[in-house]
Image (cartoon, rainbow, N blue to C red):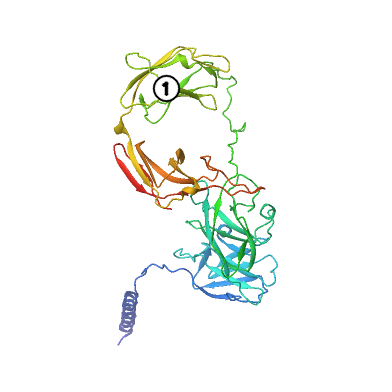
Amino acid sequence: MNRFMKLNYTKLIVLLFCFIASIGLFSCANIIPPGGGPRDSLPPRLINSLPRDSAVNISTQNIVLTFDEYVQLQAVNENVIISPNPIKSPIIDSKLRNVTVKLKDSLEKNTTYSINFGSAIKDVNEGNLAKEFTYVFSTGNKIDTNHYNGYVILAESGKIDTTLIVVLHNNLNDSAIVKNKARYLAKLNGKGYFNFNFLPAGQFAAYVIPNDFTQKYDDSTKLFAYLNQPILINKNTRTDTLYAYQEFKKKDKPLTTSMAPKSTGKAPPEDKRLKYTVNLDNGQQDLLSTLDLTFSRKLKSFDSSKIVLYDTLFKPITGYKFSLDTGNTKLSIQYPWKEKTAFRIIINKDAVSDTAGINLPKADSARFITKRESDYGSCRFRFPNIDLTKNPVLQLIVEGKIVESIPITGKEFIRKRFKPAEYEIRVLLDANKNGVWDAGKFSMPKKQPEIVLSFPKKAVIKADRDTDQSFSF
């Protein structure tokens, strides 16, 4: 074989080897299973911890928690609750599969510590939460296992506010909630439920406050609740419901100079005319309401003889009454309106005068007709297990506002004329029988707020329809 043939033969061998190798590579690639597969829906699981979970006689302030997959932390300050409540905020961090906690406070003797991470820990890949994961240890020779739970309800509305927290103080003086940091705290879930675990036995004062920076009751416009007596924590701790209230409502602050509209240098001319509006609905008078004249300024006086109701033939109507509201701006005419009846009202120029003695610019008149019976619905509300000794008052709510309050005197409430609307139904337990909700008071003499019960299902009243609905407590 000559040299030329040997070189070609060598090249052929090399090419053949490369070809076989490439086939092997492709065939290997084909037997690898495709990526993806079922989505990981499992939360991270603790596989190791230093010190171990539920360990006793612990003295270290450094904790390492190791999970079965890579984890990360989110919103640590909002989610993590350490009990007892630390004075100094700990350092909580994550790296790869580890979560580390460095406590800055000195550990108390014979004390059970718990760290509830809430929704802080999630896996890196799918974001699955290790929800309510709790790590526990004790500096003594046992883990405290007492618990305390219950509900928080807004007394005025019967609703839930999940931004509130429940706090426990081992200092039973009333000043503790004003001056001191809470010993233990718990958040509310979507149903207003709270739960304390790993508590020591003993007496505690329980309060409800907003989860703000101070975590104290230092402002009487804050939502707040308290128990009349300390709660005894033991193996058979009772369940409580606390009713939160605002003793005083916040007042809207006036606009500051920087927020107020820029001045043009000239004040707009003052309109010295006395004006009014009337509460007619497209020229129709509600059968259930008064005819209201609302004036632009306070009235000093009015002459009822100069405000006259007539029929369409200008025959004067009799039997109506006038009343002026406490603000001296709304003049109401009360009359037993009948359906589909036409009226005319004539108001003389000097019928009313404001505090400056100014009258209406001119005499005025208006025509209107009353609504029909078929414009209203009828209702029967049943309260089968209501306690009439608690002075219940039916509250009808539209768009968050109380439009009517009616004392409940029996197991049923029936009305033939009912304004069509979607009503939220609440019942006020009116302790002092004044017809309105009264807030609580924490200063002496203490007073718990009146309670309002709210029903989830609304009452939908439709025109010319009957509504029959039952509300159980």
Q: Is residue 60 left or right of residue 159?
A: right
Q: Is residue 131 left or right of residue 36?
A: right
Q: Quadrant of residue 168?
A: bottom right
Q: Few, some or many C-alpha atoms within 10 Å of disc 1 (few <14, some 14-19, many ≥20)?
A: few
**Helix, strand or loop at mark 1:** loop
Q: Is residue 383 above or below residue 230?
A: above
Q: Is residue 51 above or below residue 391?
A: below
The residue type indicated by label 1 comes to Tyr
The image position of residue 94, as x and y in percent, is 56, 66
Q: Is residue 286 above or below residue 225?
A: above
Residue 290 visible: yes
Identify the residue at horizontal 54%, vertical 24% (top origin): 328
The image position of residue 366, as x and y in percent, is 38, 18
Q: Quadrant of residue 140?
A: bottom right
The image position of residue 86, as x and y in percent, is 66, 62
Front in this rendered view, residue 148 or 430: 430
* Residue ID for mark 1: 320
The image position of residue 59, as x and y in percent, is 68, 74
Q: How many marks?
A: 1
Q: Is residue 238 left or right of residue 408?
A: right
Front in this rendered view, residue 73 or 206: 206
Of the 4 image quadrants, the one containing the N terminus is bottom left
Front in this rendered view, residue 15 or 276: 276
Q: Quadrant of residue 255?
A: top right
Residue 196 visible: no
Q: Is residue 77 above or below residue 37?
A: above
